Image: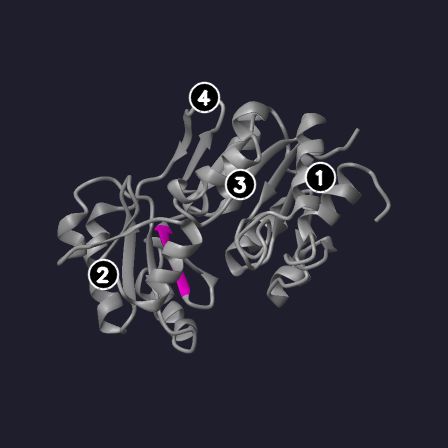
Amino acid sequence: MTQYKVLALDLDGTLTNSEKVVTPRTAAALRQAAEQGVRIVLASGRPTAGIRALARELGLEQNGGYILSYNGGKIIDCATGEELVQHPFPADLIPTVCTFARYWNVVPLTYDNEGIVTEVPDHPYVLEEARINKLPVRQVPDLPAEVTYPINKLLLVGDPVDMPHVEELMQQEFAGKLSIYRSAPFFIETMPLGVEKAASLGMLLERLGLTPAELMACGDGWNDLPMIRFAGLGVAMGNAVPPVKAAAGFVSADNDHDGVGVAVERFILGREV
């Protein structure tokens, strides 16, 4: 029996391949892990609506899995639909972040129940976020004025060349107010302070009566670093950024060559691969 009772999986660049699909080998390994009682958590920066189809595909409603969306801003029990964790974005900072984004020529977006909401629907990286999540895009004239409902994050999209500098400036501007990190070269996640994948996974483990030693986490991007360090076993994909590889206990194959499946077969199913 595996020591790992919970398996947290980043999606883009980790669980899904370059075509945004789960490979047959990986899907089979996850089914077998779930049959052994391992709880699967889809842990992504994506909005909840952009994760539900994958959760259904993997049968998480039947086998007691969870959706961790918005980098930990929300956790949902797939079997019951219950919200176990919910961190709303500070409403008073929405106009400030949007003004900052416009000044530095990056585009803010957020989400409603139907899809993506933004002022610049034809921006290439807005369209990429829509493609990743398979969600429609709705244009609004003034994003802060539109957001009169609770949100969990604002995503800033822009040229990968500019984003490290913009992220650094944001870290200074919103220090002590928001959690900010890149999830892709062209995405900056802006979250409620203290919200990241590891913190929310910690809340879930506590609820389940488990410890971090019983968690295995797989990821590839900067926003996966906290959970890779937090987990009893952190697994980096072969395509992961260097800091994630450095922090991981195991570096698997890349996401186009069953990286998650290889790790699950080895450390949960106990196969020599």
Q: Amino acid at mark 4?
A: Thr
Q: Is residue 118 left or right of residue 69?
A: left
| Residue contact at pointers 2 and 3, CB within 8 angstroms | no
Q: Amino acid at mark 2?
A: Cys
Q: In the drawing, what numbered circle is on residue 98?
A: 2
Spatial CA span between label 3 and label 1: 15 Å
Image depth: mark 4 or mark 2 in front: 4
At mark 1, the secondary structure is helix
Q: Are marks 3 and 1 in contact (CB under 8 Å)?
A: no
Q: Is residue 197 visible?
A: yes
Q: Callout 3: few (<14), some (14-19), or many (20+) C-alpha neighbours within 10 Å?
A: many
Nearest the viewer among 271 and 88 is 271
In this figure, which residue is indicated by the disc labeled 3? 42
Judge from the rendering whether residue 175 lies leftward or rightward of residue 217; answer left or right: left
Mark seen at residue 80: 4
Instruction: Say which quarter of the image contains residue 69.
Output: top left
Image coordinates of residue 3 in percent, x first then y, are 75, 33
Q: Earlier in the sequence, mark 2 or mark 3?
A: 3
Instruction: Name the residue type under label 3.
Output: Leu
Separation (CA) of disc 3 from disc 4: 16 Å
For the residues labelled 2 and 3, the Cα–Cα distance comes to 28 Å
Residue at x-position 41% and y-position 46% = 70
Q: Range of the magenta residues? A: 187-191
**Which class describes the residues within 10 Å of circle 4: few (<14), some (14-19), or many (20+)?**
few
Which residue sits at x=69%, y=42%?
232
Is residue 256 toward the left or the right of residue 197 in the image?
right
Q: Earlier in the sequence, mark 4 or mark 2?
A: 4
Apparent side of residue 175 relative to residue 183 in the rendered image (left or right) = left
